[in-house]
Image (cartoon, grey):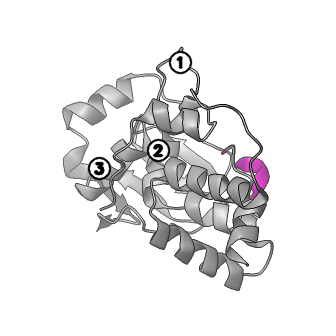
Amino acid sequence: MATSKYNKLKRCRFLELDPTAVGCYKKSTRTSGRKSRKISEYGLQLREKQRAKFIYCVNEKQIRKYYEAADRMKGITGENMLALLERRLDNVVYRMGLAATRQQARQLVSHAHFSVNGKKVNIPSYIVKAGDVVAVRENKKSNKYFTAVKESKLTPAPKWMEFDAEKLEGKIVSIPVREEIDTPIQEQMIVELYSK
């Protein structure tokens, strides 16, 4: 499993990214110590790819595979790639509000706390489809963590997903489109970088 060895706030400053995009709600008073200089087109494209990797907690090999899969699909490649990243099981758990960050969601999935359509799944990169039901497994619902989550105020699920807080399960209503994805990424720049 790929791990990020960077301090979240430092990485967010470097990528010029709002820390809330990765689930970090600390405030940083520091500014980047670098002198602002003009960044080349390649540098801008590379930064967008690094943002996507950092936000979705994927490594270079994984994001390349998502690009290649999106390129084979019908439609706009960049939007297809973002939809694939959004449909990862760890991201779905994060979007349901059952984890504070994508890293925490990844750990919960790895520890086999979730099932997809009644089958145990412990692979964070598992891609869910429209109509799939993602739920906390029956023997894990009594866990202290999930009882606390159930009592807390959960963030609302996105439009492409229905979430039942009492049953701790969500249903994928449709495949997410770009308008329903609030991630601050310019996916077209990533496509331009990989299509060279």
Return the x and y of residue 128 as percentages of the image width and height: 51, 66
> What's the magenta region?
176-183
Principal secondary structure, stretch drawn in magenta: loop
Distance, label 3 to label 1, CA atoms, is 30 Å
Amino acid type at circle 3 is Gln
Q: Earlier in the sequence, mark 1 or mark 2?
A: 1
Residue type at mark 1 is Arg
105 w.r.t. 196: above or below = above
Q: Report whether 59 appears left or right of 158.
A: left
How many numbered discs sit on the rendered protein?
Answer: 3
Mark 1 secondary-structure assignment: loop
Callout 3 environment at 10 Å: few (<14), some (14 to 19), or many (20+)? some
Q: Which mark is residue 30?
A: 1
Please tell me whether mark 3 sits on a helix, a strand or a loop.
helix
- The residue that disc 3 covers is 107
Pinpoint residue 97: horizontal percent, then vertical percent: 47, 37
Q: Nearer the viewer, mark 3 or mark 1?
A: 1
Residue 150 seen in this snapshot: yes
Q: Position of residue 57 (x, y in %)?
A: 45, 53
Q: Are marks 2 and 3 in contact (CB under 8 Å)?
A: no
| Labelled disc at residue 94 | 2
Which residue corresponds to the image point at 57% horizontal and 61% vertical from the top-left? 85
